[in-house]
C-alpha cells in the first residue's frame, strides 16, 4: 500500500501545483524516503526470482540493491547538510533552478526567504559548540515542520538558512507562510 499512497500523493500534488512528471519525481526524490517504492518493487522481484530461478538470483539482486542504495547515500552527502538534514548550498541551488523554471512555465510566482539566527554566536561562545549544533538541528527540524512538501529549506552555512516557496499566488499567502516559519523558529529551545 505504500507505493499506491506515494503515487496518489504525487498525482494530487502535481495537479494542485501544476508540476510535470519530472518535477513530481524530483519532489518525492528530495522530500520522502526515496527507496520506499524501490523497496516494494525489489521485494516482489526477489520473491519471484527466488521461486523461478533459485536462491542465487535473489542474492544477486540483493547485491545490486546495496549498490544502488550506496549511490543514493553518496548523492545525499553531496546535496544535504549533515548536521540539520536540510539541503546544503549545492542542493539548494538545484532546487532553486527547478523553482525558477516552474515559475517561468506556470507564471505563478514563488517566494525566497533568507533567514539568519540573531545571537547565534553568543550561544556558541557561552554554552559551547555542542549547544550551537543542537540549536541548528532544532532549527532544521522546525523549518521542515513549517513548510509545505513542495517547499525547500537549506542551511547555507553557519546560521544562515534559505527557504524556497514555489507556487505562492499572492502576498498574503506568502506572509502567512513566513509568519508560520517565524513563529516556529521563535519558540524556546530547551536543552538538557
Image (cartoon, rainbow, N blue to C red):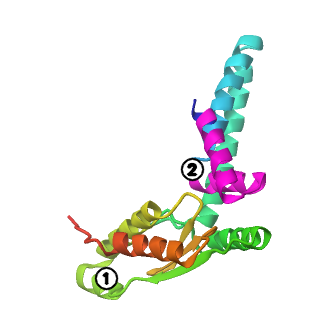
Residue 49, image x, y percentages: 74, 19
For mark 1, give the secondary structure: helix
Disc ID at residue 124: 1
Q: Which residue is depicted at the point 69% across and 34% down?
A: 63
Figure quadrant of residue 38 = top right
For mark 2, give the secondary structure: loop
**Foreground residue among 188 and 52:** 188
Figure quadrant of residue 74 = bottom right
Residue 34, image x, y percentages: 62, 47
Mark 1 and mark 2: span between their CA atoms? 32 Å
Q: Which residues are magenta?
A: 4-31
Disc ID at residue 32: 2
Q: Which residue is depicted at the point 62% across and 35% down?
A: 3
Instruction: Look at discs 1 and 2 and give the one toward the viewer.
Output: 2
Quadrant of the frame with the N terminus: top right
- Structural crowding at the residue carrying mark 2, measured as other residues with C-alpha within 10 Å and reported as few (<14), some (14–19) or many (≥20): few
Image-based side of 166 in relation to 129, left or right: right
Q: Is residue 69 visible?
A: yes
Image-based side of 19 in relation to 110, left or right: right
- Structural crowding at the residue carrying mark 1, measured as other residues with C-alpha within 10 Å and reported as few (<14), some (14–19) or many (≥20): some
Give yes or no for residue 180 being in the magenta stretch.
no
Quadrant of the frame with the C terminus: bottom left
Q: Earlier in the sequence, mark 1 or mark 2?
A: 2
**Foreground residue among 66 and 92:** 92
Give yes or no for residue 27 being in the magenta stretch.
yes
Q: Which residue is depicted at the point 57% across and 66% down?
A: 152
Amino acid at each position: 500500500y505504500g507505493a499506491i499512497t506515494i503515487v496518489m500523493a504525487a498525482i494530487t500534488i502535481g495537479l494542485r501545483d501544476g508540476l510535470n512528471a519530472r518535477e513530481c519525481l524530483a519532489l518525492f526524490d528530495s522530500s520522502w524516503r526515496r527507496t520506499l517504492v524501490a523497496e516494494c518493487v525489489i521485494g516482489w522481484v526477489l520473491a519471484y526470482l527466488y521461486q523461478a530461478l533459485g536462491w542465487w538470483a535473489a542474492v544477486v539482486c540483493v547485491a545490486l540493491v546495496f549498490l544502488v542504495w550506496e549511490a543514493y547515500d553518496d548523492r545525499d552527502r553531496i546535496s544535504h547538510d549533515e548536521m540539520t538534514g536540510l539541503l546544503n548550498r549545492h542542493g539548494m541551488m538545484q532546487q532553486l533552478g527547478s523553482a525558477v523554471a516552474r515559475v517561468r512555465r506556470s507564471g505563478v510566482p514563488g517566494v525566497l526567504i533568507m533567514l539568519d539566527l540573531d545571537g547565534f554566536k553568543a550561544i556558541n561562545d557561552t554554552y559551547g559548540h555542542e549547544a550551537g549544533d543542537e540549536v541548528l538541528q532544532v532549527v532544521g527540524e522546525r523549518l521542515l515542520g513549517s513548510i509545505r512538501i513542495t517547499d525547500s529549506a537549506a542551511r547555507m552555512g553557519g546560521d544562515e538558512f534559505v527557504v524556497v516557496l514555489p507556487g505562492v499566488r499572492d502576498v498574503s499567502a506568502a506572509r502567512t507562510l513566513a509568519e508560520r516559519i517565524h513563529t516556529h523558529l521563535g519558540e524556546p529551545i530547551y536543552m538538557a
